[in-house]
Image (cartoon, grey):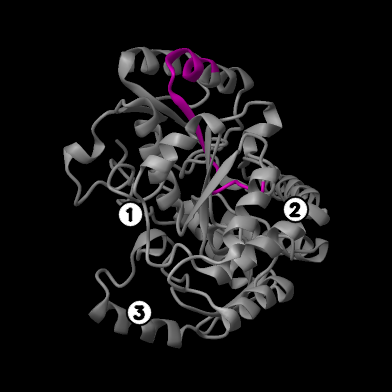
Amino acid sequence: MTRANSQDRALRDRAAAVIPGGMYGHQAVGLLPDDYPQFFKRGDGAHIWDADGNRYLDLMCAYGPNLFGYAHPEIDAAYVRQLGVGDTLTGPTALMVRLAEEMTEMVGHAAWAMFCKNGTDATTMALMTARAHTRRKTIVRAKGAYHGAAPWCTPRPTGTIDADHAHQIFCDYNDVASLEEAVAKAGDDLAAIFAAPFKHDAFIDQARPDLAYARKARELADATGALLIVDDVRAGLRVARDCSWSAIGVEPDLSTWGKCIANGHPISALLGSEKARKAAASIYVTGSFWFQAAPMAAALETLRLVRTTDYLERIAGMGERLSAGLTERAAAHGLGLRCSGPGQMPLYLFDDDPDLRKGFFFVSQMLDRGAYLHPWHNMFLCAAMTDADIDGVLNAAEDAFAALKREGPGLAPVDKLAFLAGGQR
């Protein structure tokens, strides 16, 4: 199809004059094909509309927050009702206590909860809690793992100093020997082991957690007195209704949550075990909008749907069908496509595509056919999607793979990936 883009281009020009770089963060200019829209006007269910009115099935789900569908009537009604009563007040409402009760009842390891706004807030609170609990400084975390955009964990260190990244030792995810070596290097100064729920680094194949690795992380934390932290900001409620590592029988001391726990309304959380309660009470963390009541009302309605619907089983099933279908159709065109990660949070990468020229071309072709995919970041499925939506993506992919097969030899390399290249510490 031919997509209109005049409004988006006009907004880009205006943004370039008043916003550094024209855009920042995960939507920064150059991180996606140039024909991808930068601005959007609305979302409904599983679909988004860009500033020019082009409609797409959104396989990014706002980078994760959309779990039950954009503009979900019940969740948004709960939010709006609370707005009419009170939202940002001098202190929290009773909804904060109720939400903490429901989240600790839902998550097996959790005895308490604290609420904030973004995933970075939650992971930084977890770091502070671990250091307060142990009175130590050093953390161990996996190379390439994303834990937020604060100076201590940002993947792009421009504007930070060495001290911001001090007292961190890196290991290889799912590599027991590497984890043991990192913990040994920390010695008696180990405060925490940070773990992603699965390996969901950008640009590379995803990997589910190896049970031996997860058990060793738990064992090493117990042996050293450090805390084990599972950063579930991205995967929480999409892998399990409990903490993601509950699926393999390993419980952390702290877990961080965000993105979809209120279906896109702004709230995140730190959950913790009894042993870390005193330390969590001792740190000073706050924000002007952290006690907002309306997002808490939305979160309570989201959790009700988590408990009472088969959303998780449906999105997992649709995701596996989509990944299998794409792999099969790519192979039929003589293309190697690797689909990794859980089906409901997949990453698609082409074989023999080190500079992502195939990936960028393919997702642009899919965008032309009404499906919004990403060339190097894991994607997300939501409960508003249907089997017909999956069929539509697979049908679109038939044409996109055919176009890639025709055009592939002449594609120019992608030269716009400096954002992360060389930026990992």
Q: Camera-side residue: 403 or 18?
A: 18
Type of residue at label 3? Answer: Arg
Residue 233, can we see it? no
* Highlighted magenta segment, given as a residue range: 219-238
The reply to whether dot 2 and dot 3 touch (C-beta < 8 Å) is: no
Distance between the Cα atoms at labels 2 and 3? 34 Å
Type of residue at label 2? Answer: Ile
Helix, strand or loop at mark 1: loop
The reply to whether dot 1 and dot 3 touch (C-beta < 8 Å) is: no
Spot occupied by residue 178 in the image (x, y as percentages of width and height): 43, 17
The C terminus appears in which quarter of the rendering? top left
Mark toward the start of the polypeptide (2 vs 1): 2
Spot occupied by residue 63 in the image (x, y as percentages of width and height): 53, 59
Tell me the number on the disc at residue 415: 1
Q: Residue at x 23, y 32 (%)?
A: 166
Please give the residue where the numbered disc 3 appears in the rendered image. Answer: 12
Distance between the Cα atoms at labels 1 and 3? 20 Å
**Is 228 part of what is drawn in magenta?**
yes
Q: Camera-side residue: 117 or 370?
A: 117
The N terminus appears in which quarter of the rendering? bottom right
Please give the residue where the numbered disc 2 appears in the rendered image. Answer: 315
Dot 3 surroundings within 10 Å: few (below 14), some, or many (20 or more)?
some
To which quarter of the image does residue 6 belong? bottom left
